[in-house]
Image (tube, helix red, strand yellow):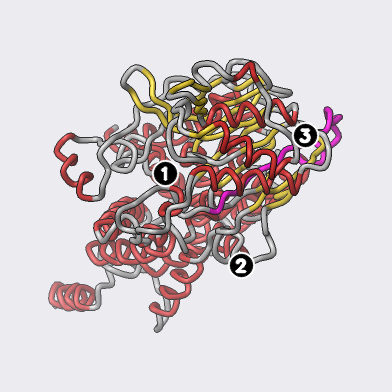
Amino acid sequence: MLWRLDLVEKVKAKLLNKTNDVRVGKKPWLLFLLSLVIVAFAQPSKIFFLCPIASICGYGIFWHVMRSFSKKRAFLLSFSWFFLVQMSWQSWLCSTKYQGIAMVLVYIFICAFFAVQFSLVSLILWKKQLSWKNILLAPAVWTLMEMSRVFILTGYLWGPVGLSLSALPLSLQWASIGGVYFLSFWVMLCNALFCTAVETKKHLMHLLTLCFIPYLFGFCHETIQKKRDCEKDFSALLIQTGLLPEEKYSLSDFPRQFIRPLDQWKMIFHSIQKEVKENIDLIVLPEAALPYSSFLTFYSLEDLKNLWRTCFEEELYFPSLLCKPFAEYEYGRWVVSNAYINQALSIKFHCGVICGLDHHEEGLNYNSAFLFANEKVPNRYDKQILVPLGEYIPFSFLNPIAAQFGILSFFSEGKSSKPFIEKFPIGVSICLEEIYPELMRESRRNGASLFVNISNDGWFPNSTLPKQHFDHGILRAVENGVFLFRAGNTGVTGVVDPFGRIVKTFKENKQDGEKTKGSLFIKVPFHHHNTLYTFWGDNLIFGISFLICLLFLRRTFA
């Protein structure tokens, strides 16, 4: 009789999918939806006050629900939940105005890939009895998965879990120890502890301590570092051209919207003349600020002189620049390049000018940033991280697909992160390079004492991309303890201090600030400080995570 009763109980358990002893009440789906809303919108670019909630319990609530299902259903539920989360986080990929409907397929694939990663980690916490082994293993595996994305998906690093811990200035300072992946590890660890504390009524003090530590560190860190003496004031003018791709380039799909390059310069001149009222240290123009390559002699010098006289009320006279590579004499007239105009601006305002321009050299094309400083030979930085399909083709069989979107030429990768030397050593990054922590750290270790990022997020209009891009830039400033100056073609143009606090953004109080044309003048008491992240980079959290996984494997197979 006893064996029959056991059999009946087993059948009941199977039918009810109660493979664990966990209880979530009669309405688990309410908790499912609650956790989904918290995490899906817990991004600094979305609903910032949900971020600290998500970093403590957003994922933990879901894991609590997930553990009441069978292993198979728990995996599917985890996949569905995180897929919906990623649809919110990666929603900017749905902007198909320029990329076409194929971008939606990329969007779905990326969301699904990240959902599979999360589902595998969730299974670590699915087991009947949660121990410290599971609590530590889950964040370790997740962190290694996030770090691995630099080698897969062409290095797609958008949307790490740790962003939720960066929404508040105090907790953001935690990144100065181990970077954004250290934040991701901490978020997942707190959530795993929350799940355990809810079910076992244990580890509550451990949870509260872990949640409190980043804020305590942030307060102490800022208090100590702000006592440092500031160096000289640093002033910069950041130009936001506000041009959509069809206005900057002559695109066949958008006829009659192209603005002549000289007229584009006219708008830039007016922006400079309007804001420059005193001595200035640096003028920054965005990525690919003008069409045509850096030293292509395209503009009539006479037309440029007329424009210069109209905008600046003085004559354009820089005879030392009338030579190659800045200018050429052909068909009885002088023609000049974008480089000539930038160099002329540098001489006029006695400051450095950083401008993003395409560059052709020895049969190769580069997406470059130039530093023009008075009459010196301009320095050049070539973009090292290229956008797949847009700037390079990862596989040759994709060439016909790219050709359908009018992409016929591609860029070559840059090779070094050597800073520009002006009033201070400047570490320059171009567009998405800003989301690569180790690349920015390399620039800092090479001597950069401030970061300048030039971007062009106009290819994804009316999306959250510009703000998400800006959030990653804020992290890079904190990780390395430096100011960040950003000039975006369509935003976000602004300045961030070494503690991740936004000093000022262009048109910050206007809804159309992303596409507004103009400039932002900023003067700050310049300072920077060393951080532990600059010293050891991602090696710290990689070593911790790898060691935890190694100890788990040793115990499993011992």
Magenta segment, which residues?
Answer: 221-242
Position of residue 271 in the picture relative to residue 17 (left or right)? right
Position of residue 516 in the picture relative to residue 65 (left or right)? right
Residue 49, placed above or below residue 183:
below
Position of residue 57 in the picture relative to residue 168 (left or right)? left
Which amino acid does the dot numbered 1 rest on? Leu
Q: Which mark is residue 157?
A: 1
- Pinpoint residue 54: horizontal percent, then vertical percent: 54, 61
- Pinpoint residue 456: horizontal percent, then vertical percent: 49, 46
Which amino acid does the dot numbered 2 rest on? Gln
Identify the residue shown where x is 49% and y is 40%: 290
Identify the residue shown where x is 36% and y is 66%: 84
Instruction: Single out the mark in the foreground, 2 or 1.
Output: 2
- Pinpoint residue 262: horizontal percent, then vertical percent: 53, 43
Instruction: Single out the mark in the foreground, 2 or 3.
Output: 3
Instruction: Single out the mark in the foreground, 1 or 3.
Output: 3
What residue is shown with label 2? 511
Label 2: which secondary element: loop
- Residue 91 highlighted magenta (yes or no): no
Q: Which mark is residue 280?
A: 3
Identify the residue shown where x is 60% and y is 28%: 427
- Pinpoint residue 233: horizontal percent, then vertical percent: 83, 33
Q: Quadrant of the C terminus?
A: top left
Identify the residue shown where x is 72% and y is 51%: 504
Label 1: which secondary element: loop
Who is closer to the viewer here, 180 or 507?
507
